[in-house]
Structure formats: structure tokens, C-alpha cells
Amino acid sequence: MFDTLSGSLQKIFKNLRGYGKLNERNIKDAMREVRMALLEADVHYEVVKDFTARVREQCMGADVLDSVTPGQQVVKHIHDELINLLGSNHKEFDLNARPAALLLLGLHGAGKTTTASKLALRWKKEGRKVVLVACDIRRPAAVQQLQVLGKQIGVDVIAPEPGESVPALGRRARKLTEQSGVDVAIYDSGGRFQVDEELVAELKELKQAVDPRNVALVVDAAIGQESVHVAESFHEAVGLTGLILTKLDGDARGGAALSIQHVTGCPILLVGVGERPEDLEPFYPDRMASRILGMGDVVSLVEKAQAVVDQDQMVRMEERLRRNTFDFEDFLIQLEQMEKMGPLENLLEMLPGGAEIPEQAKQQLGADSGKQWGQAKAIIQSMTPQERRNPLLIKGRRRERIARGSGTDVRAVNDLMKRFDQMKRMAKKMKKMEKRLRKARK
Ligand SMILES: Nc1nc2c(ncn2[C@@H]2O[C@H](COP(=O)(O)OP(=O)(O)OP(=O)(O)O)[C@@H](O)[C@H]2O)c(=O)[nH]1
Ligand SMILES: [Mg+2]
């Protein structure tokens, strides 16, 4: 996420740290470099101008000029201003109605339909009753796309009846959801290549029919500054309550995220970071600023782990490790939980300094670990249930069979068995240590 921008900013900071003291001149030089980095990231030029002016003013304060660590003070001011630019505080959807309606709109291919299903899954997991409404009747197969996604995540989809107009569908869905005690209704609308009159007219009518509390624009972050114009036109024409940026996992340079809320005054609520239904993150300006500056975002990482990892299962597993009854069934569950966290390269980025790891190395690491996890899974899946529960059974001939079954070789099977043994031995050692400690305390 925003690798190039992160990289250039960090280079600037490194130079700044080299100075014993800062003065008007080297601050000016540094700000020129910051300006270049932001413009290169496709941040709106007015935004860049304001930003650097404010940071410069703060850097001329006593805390920087008299500081023995001026570089760090500058980074702090840039961090603060980035947070400001990104909207200061985290904002949420307004779900204080029953049903609370959310109308999603945006250009063609921005990610409306995908985001609709991601949100539906998120709210469903929170225990809300969610319904999706397929209001894109112009593009063939659009309704079907939403129905397929709905089925995947187990959420009902209200589809148009033959000949039904978009506003008529909106009115019908509104009534239906009011009567059936739905908590949230998500309306997925149709897109266009540009904001034109027909689209605006349709959206206005739909908005009137549905009377949604939330009207969110879905924007593809990869289109950079252009997204700001798009957001401005939609906001002016239809009225928005928030923004959702998608495809931040791709090669988006940051321009959209850093300009859009400042220019439109609409908060960014969520960001899409992949194609899977789970790949949606709440937007926190402070965490995003830290990520851009390469300080990592450990809070989001921990939250992610909490959301995808089954806590009860982890506790049970730890218990089994302690009692030395941990077997390959447990190992498999653990591998699956790790896979749920998503590709390793995305996780690395959330660690402090993670942004500094070269992109290629990150992808290599991600690919290697993915391959290893995949291989370990295949090997365990080729064991019989009996073998999984009693690994001592797995000797010579059986190892050969498992290697063949999993498309690996005996060495890979041996390696996995070794790692498994090490894990168990480690658990045993820890148990002994605990016992000794407890004795010592008595
Ligand atoms: N990598 C990535 N791909 C995404 C993300 N969000 C959506 N996509 C992909 O973008 C493509 C378009 O997504 P849709 O949800 O169909 O877009 P839409 O806005 O509904 O498009 P129309 O209905 O044609 O207007 C799909 O291939 C999605 O998988 C994201 O956050 N990251
Ligand atoms: Mg769509």
C-alpha cells in the first residue's frame, strides 16, 4: 500500500536525521522534497501546497529548531498533518434505524457489488440481519453477480421483477425490509464510465425511493486524483455521507486517499484491500498515517488476527499442546487459521519497518510461505485419520505413501514430521519450566 510514497518519505526522514540541527534552509529543502513525493503520489496539488505550508510553519517552532533530535520532531509534525488530511477521526456508518439503508454508488467497475457483499458479511458477523438489493438492472448478469455473492456469504438478495424500474424496486425493497425486521439493507446500484445525467437522475430517484441514512461512494483508489473529481461530482449531484476506497492492495499511489476527504469534506469510512469477502478494513486516519510513514499498524494487525482466528479453538489447541495431546488434526487447524489472515506480504506491511522491505522480497516471502503452508496442508491431508491422531505410526512405508499422495517427496514429509516434533518438544520444555518456576516461588 503506497509503497513508493512511503519509500520517498522515509528517505527524506533519513536525511533529516543526519542533520545535527535544523535551520530555515534545510527545512525548506526537506519540504521541497516532501512536496515532490506527494505530487508523485498523485496527491491533489492544492492539498500538497496547504500540507507543506502547514508542516513548514510547525517545523519553524522551537520544538524542532532547538531539539537535539530535529528529524524525529519533523516526522511527528508530518504524521499529525497526515492524520488531519485523512480526516482526523474514524467514522462509522449510521445504523441507528431499522432498517438502516445504505445506498452504494460509483463508476463502472469501482467495486460496488464486491463491497456490498463484503459489508453484508461484516454486518452479518456482527449479528445483524442484512439484506442485499440488486438495483443494477442495466448491465446483464449484474443481478446474478450479486446473487452468487449473496449465496456465498449466506445473505438474502432482493432482485428486480421482470420489467420493474429501479425506483419501483427501491420502494418495494424498502417496504419488504421494513416489514421483515431487517437491520441493514444494502442497495447495490449500477455504474457508468462517467458521471452523466441519466445516471444522476436514476440515482436521485432511487435515493428518494429508499431514503437511505447512508449514501456511500465507492471509488477505485488506483485512478488517483481523478477520483477526487468523481467524488466531487457525485457529492454535488446526489449528496454523499461517506466514501469507500477500493483496490488499496494494488498499485494505488495514495493520491486518492490523501486528497479525497480533504477536498470533498466526506469521510473515508472503509478501504477495500482485496477481492475476497473478508478484504475490507475500517479506515482509521491515524493508523493509515503510520502505515504511510512506515511506522507500521500493529493495532490493525492484532484486530485482524482477533477477527479471523477462532479464539476458542486457539485456547483448546494451547491446552492440547500442554497436555501433549496435540496431533496433526490440530496442526491442520492451525495452518488453516494462518491462511485466513491473508497473504503474508500484506501482513508484513503492517509491521514497523515493513514498508522498507523491498517489494520483491516481500512477494517472495509471501509466495514461499504460501507454498510451504500449502505443502504442509497437502501432506497432512494425505495422512489417514488414524495417522493424524497418532503420528508415531508414520514410519518408512507410510511416509512414502504420504509423499506420493501429497505430490511431494519423502524429504518434505520428514521435514514436516521434524517440525511437528520440535513443536511438541518445545511445549514439553515450557511445561517443565513452568513447574520449576512454580516450585521456586513456593
Ligand atoms: N484487488 C482488489 N480488487 C477489487 C477490490 N474491490 C473490487 N475489486 C475487483 O474489481 C472488479 C470490479 O468489481 P465490482 O464489484 O464488480 O464493481 P462494480 O462497481 O459493481 O462494477 P459495475 O457493477 O460494473 O458498475 C472485480 O473484479 C472485483 O473483484 C479491492 O479492494 N481490491
Ligand atoms: Mg456492480
Image: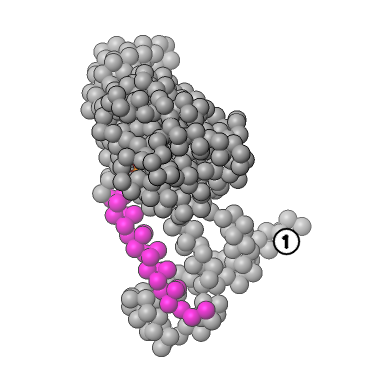
Magenta stretch: dominant SS?
helix
Vertical relation: 149 (above or below) 326: above
Q: Which residue is mark 1?
A: 439
x then y, percent, for residue 99? 58, 35
Vertical relation: 196 (above or below) 435: above
Asked which quadrant contains residue 130, the reply is top right
The verdict on residue 263 being magenta is no
Give the magenta range.
Answer: 361-385
Q: Is mark 1 within 8 Å of ligand 1?
A: no
Q: Quadrant of the N terminus?
A: top left
Can residue 334 be seen at all in this image of the molecule? yes
Asked which quadrant contains residue 3, the reply is top left
Mark 1 neighbour density, 10 Å: few (under 14) some (14–19) many (20 or more): few
Left or right for 75, reference 210: left
x then y, percent, for residue 421? 50, 72
Give the residue at the far front of this rendering. 163
Residue at screen point 35% across, 45% down: 142
Residue at screen point 38% across, 52% down: 343
The verdict on residue 383 being magenta is yes
Q: What amino acid is at disc 1?
A: Lys
Left or right for 302, reference 4: right
Secondary structure type for disc 1: helix
Give the residue at the far bottom of this rendering. 397
Left or right for 26, reference 113: left
Residue at screen point 48% across, 71% down: 420
x then y, percent, for residue 40? 22, 28
Residue at screen point 31% across, 18% down: 47
**Image quarter for ligand 1:** top left
